[in-house]
Image: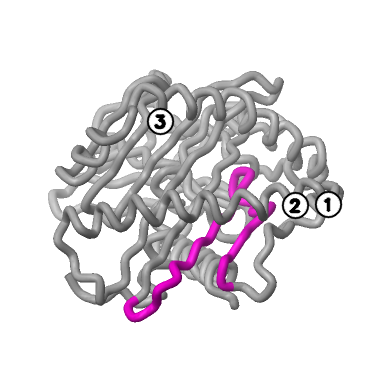
Amino acid sequence: MKNREPWVVVLLLLLVTMDLTQYCAGSRWLQTFNTVIAEPRKSAHQFIQVSYVDSIQFQGFDSQAPNAKMRPRAAWMEQEPPEYWEKGTAQAPRLSLTNQRVLQFLVIENKHSKNEYHTLQELFGCNVANDGSFLRGQYRLTYYGYDNIILNEDLSSWTTEGSAAQDLMKYSETGGMAESWRTYLLRECTERLIRCLELGKETLLRSYAPQTHLTHQVRPDGNVTLRCWALGFYPADITLTWQRDGKNHTQDMELPDTRPAGDGTFQKWAVVIVPSGEEQRYTCHVHHEGLPEPLTLKWEPSTTIPIMAILTGLILGTLVMGTVVYLLVWKK
């Protein structure tokens, strides 16, 4: 295993953020990322915590920042009293110590050198409907790509990936851990999310309609890829479906997770593979709360947006998000 430079750690954090975020219709997510970084020849580990509502960071802590404290990252969080920030600052060292012990265990179990960069990432969060009711929770502990400990959707059982993660769970009271996380996600996490929505309603409860396009690409086998794009929308809840002759069509369809665009909005697309010459039989249907009514898109050769232009926009969006994460996480 090669040494991990800081920018690699940032990239890993970005990938976890993008891959694990899933959304239910008419809902909001609160997610917290704890990252412990062990650097060669440094006895003190770095502990970073960032918390988001959907894609908007609202607070953060960095143990290596001058006068390290839990600090607001959104203007509306400055309404919280000093006691709130003092509590968050006091909790950070305890969380860091717990995660450091886990990281040390996994490094030893995997027989990895202490003279390399190592990171442990902890993700947890809750998803609530617009009426404030709890929908689902999540917890995941990740040591690079080697080991994962995942709280299942029932919030009472675990899934482990990797032999070291399995060994770690043997020494833990898994039943008690699950109950503790279940209680936190159902109560404290949900209450915090509702509180954030109250404080930042002008920002968090806004709505941006998606910009929609269809692209057309001939495949080597002679068939055609039709891609339905939805860009620049907020909140993340959106539904994209394909129909063939007015009936739902799921065969040969690809529907990736909703992804942050890097500017506070989201992106999504739905792909379907169709026989050449039959493109007009297919329609894409877009549902989003920012639209006055659902949209129906059909491929028209004269109005198709070149696929490279869309891909360029997505790449730029990803680079922007990577830069933002880098500045937030690594700024000293």
Q: Which residue is mark 2?
A: 85
Q: Which residue is mark 1?
A: 82
Contact between marks 2 and 3 (CB within 8 A): the answer is no
Q: CA distance from mark 2 to mark 3?
A: 47 Å
Q: Which residue is mark 3?
A: 242
Q: Is residue 213 above or below residue 240?
A: below
- Within 10 angstroms of label 3, few (less than 14), some, or many (20 or more) residues? many
100 or 310, which is in the foreground? 100
Amino acid identity at mark 3? Trp
- Residue at 32% over, 66% down: 118
Secondary structure mostly taken by the magenta-highlighted segment of the chain:
strand
Query: Which corner quadrant of the image does residue 281 belong to?
Result: top left
The N terminus - image quarter: bottom left
Left of 52 or right of it: where is 310?
A: left
Amino acid identity at mark 2? Trp
Q: CA distance from mark 3 to mark 1?
A: 51 Å
Q: Is residue 331 above or below residue 162?
A: below
Q: Which residues are magenta?
A: 40-64
257 or 229, which is in the foreground? 257
**Which secondary structure lies at badge 1?**
helix
- Within 10 angstroms of label 2, few (less than 14), some, or many (20 or more) residues? some
